Image (cartoon, rainbow, N blue to C red):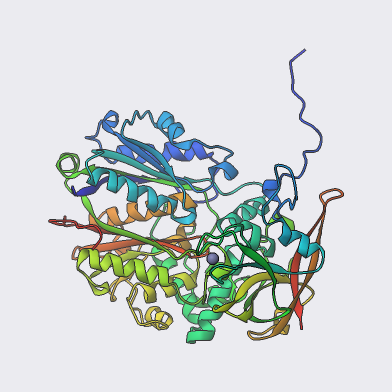
Amino acid sequence: MRNVAIVGAGITKFGVREASWKDLVQEAGKAAFKDVPNLDKKEVDSLIVGAAQPERWAYQTHVAPLVAELLGLRPTRVVARTEVACASGQAAIRYAWLAIATGLSDIAFVIGVEKMTSKNMAISQTSMINVANREFDGPSGMTAPPFFAMVAQRHMHDYGTTREQMAVVREKNSTYGSYNPYAQFTKRFSVDAVINSKVVAPPLCLFDCCGMTDGAAAVVLAAEEIAKKLTDTPVWIIGGTQCVFAADTVNQMGNLSEWPALRRAAKELYNMLGIGPRDIDFAELHDCFTISEIMEYEELGFCEKGEGGKFVEEGRSYIGGDVAVNPSGGLLSFGHPLGATGVRQAWEVFNQFRGSVPKERYVGSNARIAITHNLSGLASLHHIMAYSIEKRKEIKLGG
Amino acid sequence: MVKSIRIPATIPFPPLLDLWEQQDEKGPDATRIYQFYKNLAEGRFTTTKCKDCGKLLYPPVAVCSECLSENLEWVDIPKVGEVYAFTEVRAGAPLQFQDTVPFIIAIVRFGDYPKNGIQVSGIMFDLSSEEVKIGTKVEWEPLEILGPGEMRRYWYCFKKA
Ligand SMILES: [Zn+2]
C-alpha cells in the first residue's frame, strides 16, 4: 500500500445559494486547484464525485463526466460517482484513497456537491424519504427530523439524556461555526435559544437540526512521492472503515438508541491503526442533529454508552477537552449538502493540521490524529476516515 | 413568428413525488409482492414468512433474505402492538403531508420483537403527542390513499387500542 495525502482543498460558501449544481462544482473546483498552485490539473488521473441525489435536485445524471467537462479534467484511471446518501462525499475520498494506495492512480480529484434548496422545499423533503426504504417507511412521512426525534426520545428514555445536554451540542458547534465564514449559520446559539426555538418534531427543535443546504467541497489527493512536490503540509490518510448492518427499513434497526454498526466500524479502525479512542485529537462528526453527536461519542468509545450527554455537558468534547469535536462548526453550522459534507470535513481536517484556521477554533499544533465520521440513511451505514500529520510506515488493511 | 414549444397545462403527478407504490398486479409497474397490497385492500395487514428457515420477513419480499428460498407464506401481523417510539411532525413535512401537519409518526412493535415480531412505522391521526406514550397499546387499521384522479390505493395507519 502506498501512502496517500491530501495536498489541497477548497470549498464554496455553504447556504441557500443563488447558484446551480454546476456553478457549485466550478466554485469548489477552482478553490481547490488554487490551493495547489504547483499542480498542473492535466496530471489529475482520477476523478470521483460524491453526489447523493443530483437526479432529483438538479435533474442530472452521469455527473462525473460532466464535472470533468466543467473543470477541464481528462482523467484516465478512475472516473466515478459515489452515492451513499449523507456519506457520499466521504465514500468518494475512500475510493480515491484506495485507488492511489493500490497504485492504480497517482493524483485524484475528489469533489462532493449537492444542490438541495428549491422554490418548493416540500419537494426537497420528499426526496429525503428515499434514503430509507421508500416503499415501507415513506408512507409514514419518515424524513430525517421525525426519525432522529424518535432516536432522541429513546436515548432520553433509555439513558436519561436531557433536553439541555442536546442543546449544549449546538451551543458548542455554533460557537466554533461563528468563526467559519464558509458556514451557512455563523450565529451563536445559547442552550436557551436552542430549547426555545420552534419545535420541529418533539423533542427536537429547529436549532437541533442541520439545514438543507447548497454547497460543494473538493480535495486533491496524491501518492507520497508526488505529494511532497505539491505541498509542504501534506495531511495523510491513515485509515478508513465502514460498516452497515443490513437495514434500510425501520424493522431492521433494532433499538434506536444504539448504533452497533458505528461501534463496529470504530473497532475496525482502531484495530487497523493500533490505536484507541483516546489517541484521537479532534474529530469532525456527523452532527446532522444534536442527538447524533451525543450518540457518536458513545459508539466511538470517547465515553461509556449512555454517557454522551454528560460528556458534552462537562466540556470534554470542546477544544481543550478530551477530544475536540466539530471545530469547524459541524453540519449544524454548515448545513448538510449530502454529497459535499464528507469532503467538507476533510477540508477542515486539512486546514486544522496546517494551522490555517482562526485561533478561536484552532485545535492546536500538538494534534496528531483526526477522524471524520458520516452516518447515512436512518443511521444504518457508518463511515470513518482517519488522518494524520504524520504518515504511517505501513498501512495494513483488514486490521 | 418565433418558433416555440408549448408544455401541457398540467403534468400528471409524477410517481417520483408519490410515496405509495403503484400496487399493480400486472404490467410494468407490477410487483411480486402484489399480494401484500391485495391483502391490505381486503383489510388484512400481512407479511411473508419463510417456510424453509422460518424467518419472519418484513417488509414482505419475493425471496427470503436469510436463506434465499422462494418458498414463502403470507402471515397476518397481530392486530395490537405497543408504541416503541413516536414524535409529532409539526414542520418540514414532505409534499404529500402538507395538509395533514401536525401528525404523529410512531414506531410500533407487534409480536415478540426482534425474535418473532416486527417493528413498523406508521401515522396516527387526530391525536396530540400528549395522548401517546412509549408503551401505549395501538392497533393497525386500513388507510385508503385516494388519487391522483380516480386512483385508489391502500396502506395502513395506527389508532389507540
Ligand atoms: Zn429462509
A321 and A240: which is toward the camera: A240
Q: Exactly how many numbered labels are in the figure?
A: 0
Q: Position of residue A120 (x, y in %)?
A: 67, 49
- Which residue, as the protein is rendered here, is positioned at the far left? A393
- At x 46%, y 57%, the residue is A334
x and y, in percent, of residue B158 in the image: 74, 74
Q: Is residue B70 left or right of residue A336?
A: right
Task: Decide which of A345, B151 is in the foreground and name it.
Answer: B151
Locate residue A126, reporting x and y percent: 65, 54
Q: Is residue A108 visible?
A: yes
Q: Is residue A173 above or below residue A230?
A: below
Q: Residue at the right extreme?
A: B150
Residue at 74% across, 15% down: B2
**To which quarter of the image does residue A36 belong?**
top left
Position of residue A23 in the picture relative to residue A302 (left or right):
right
A370 to A341, vertically: above or below: below
Residue at the (61%, 60%) spot, across then down: B61
In the figure, A189 relative to A43: above or below? below
Image quarter of residue A28: top left
Q: Is residue B98 visible?
A: no
Q: Nearer the viewer, residue A300 or A233?
A: A300
Q: Image point 49% across, 57% down: which residue? A: A335
Between A258 and A16, which is closer to the camera in this rendering? A258
Give ligand 1's quarter of the image: bottom right
